[in-house]
Amino acid sequence: NDTGKDTNGKAKCISGDPAEVVPGCNVILFALPTDRHEMYLKAMLPYIKAGTIIGSMSSVGDFDLSVRNELGSALTDKCTLFSLETLPWACRIQTFGRVVQVLGTKKDIDLCVYPGDQCWKIRDLVQSMIGPLPVVATSPTENFLGITIMNPNGIAHPSIMYGLLRNWDGVTPFAKPPLFYQGVDDFTVDIIA
């Protein structure tokens, strides 16, 4: 990877059944598209206990509201929620379920925590999970809206898609799928800037 040190790990359990994975979890971390959060939360609900730390690697999509909607206020208020401003890394799958390539590591990322008095504890936990980079910055805030709005993907991703598709006729299939970040050219950079 780009920081010079590879990290390896092995999953303790892989299952499509939340009953086999969630009971006893102290931390639940979502690293998936935001439109899937509610579906997974709904499936996990019977197994989430008070005191669980529930987080999302990306704040886009009102994560806190999704948790509250699926778990209810009574349970949500007994849990700690957090969300990172953006994903810590840009990655590509090399071998599905086994190997990813880290294309780039962010320098720093922001963190939002509810309740706010847990921010330093959660910052330290997240930093220990992702390693020394990116540096997790935080302040005692419970406002997920601010971190959702400041996420750079809302500007960068539509610009990149426009740059990739600007000359496409909308009909002719691509010879191969366009690469997202690797397909950025000077025209697209000018749009983002």
Image (cartoon, rainbow, N blue to C red):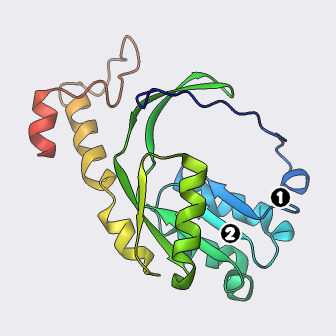
Answer whether labels 2 and 1 touch (C-beta < 8 Å).
no
- CA separation in Å, label 2 and label 1: 12 Å
Look at the image and tell me whether residue 151 can be seen: yes
Q: Is mark 1 on a helix, strand or loop?
A: loop
Q: Residue 177, how many percent across, how many down?
A: 40, 20
Q: Looking at the image, which is closer to me, 184 or 174?
A: 184
Residue 181 located left or right of residue 138: left
Look at the picture and state if 103 lies above or below 153.
Answer: above
Task: Please name the residue shown 23% across and 24% down the image.
Answer: 169
Q: Looking at the image, which is closer to me, 183 or 77?
A: 77
Q: Image quarter for residue 151?
A: bottom left
Badge 1: residue crowd in 10 Å (few <14, some 14–19, many ≥20): some
Q: For the residue marked with disc 2, what is the amino acid?
A: Ile
Label disc, if present, on residue 82 of the rendered structure: none
User: Which residue lies under the disc numbered 1?
Assistant: 22
Q: Looking at the image, which is closer to me, 91 or 149?
A: 91
Q: Residue 163, how many percent across, how many down?
A: 20, 33
Badge 2: residue crowd in 10 Å (few <14, some 14–19, many ≥20): many
Q: For the residue marked with disc 1, what is the amino acid?
A: Val
Residue 95 located left or right of residue 193: right
User: Which residue lies under the disc numbered 2?
Assistant: 53
Look at the picture and state if 88 lies above or below 83.
Answer: above
Q: Residue 85, how many percent across, how many down?
A: 41, 60
For marks 2 and 1, give the one nearer the viewer.
Answer: 2
Task: Please name the residue shown 26% across and 46% down the image.
Answer: 156
Task: Please name the residue shown 77% across and 65% down the image.
Answer: 26
Task: Please name the residue shown 74% across and 65% down the image.
Answer: 42
Q: Is mark 2 on a helix, strand or loop?
A: strand
Q: Image quarter for residue 140?
A: bottom left
Q: Residue 103, how many percent across, how many down?
A: 40, 29
Q: Looking at the image, which is closer to me, 13 or 74?
A: 13
Look at the picture and state if 46 lies above or below 12.
Answer: below
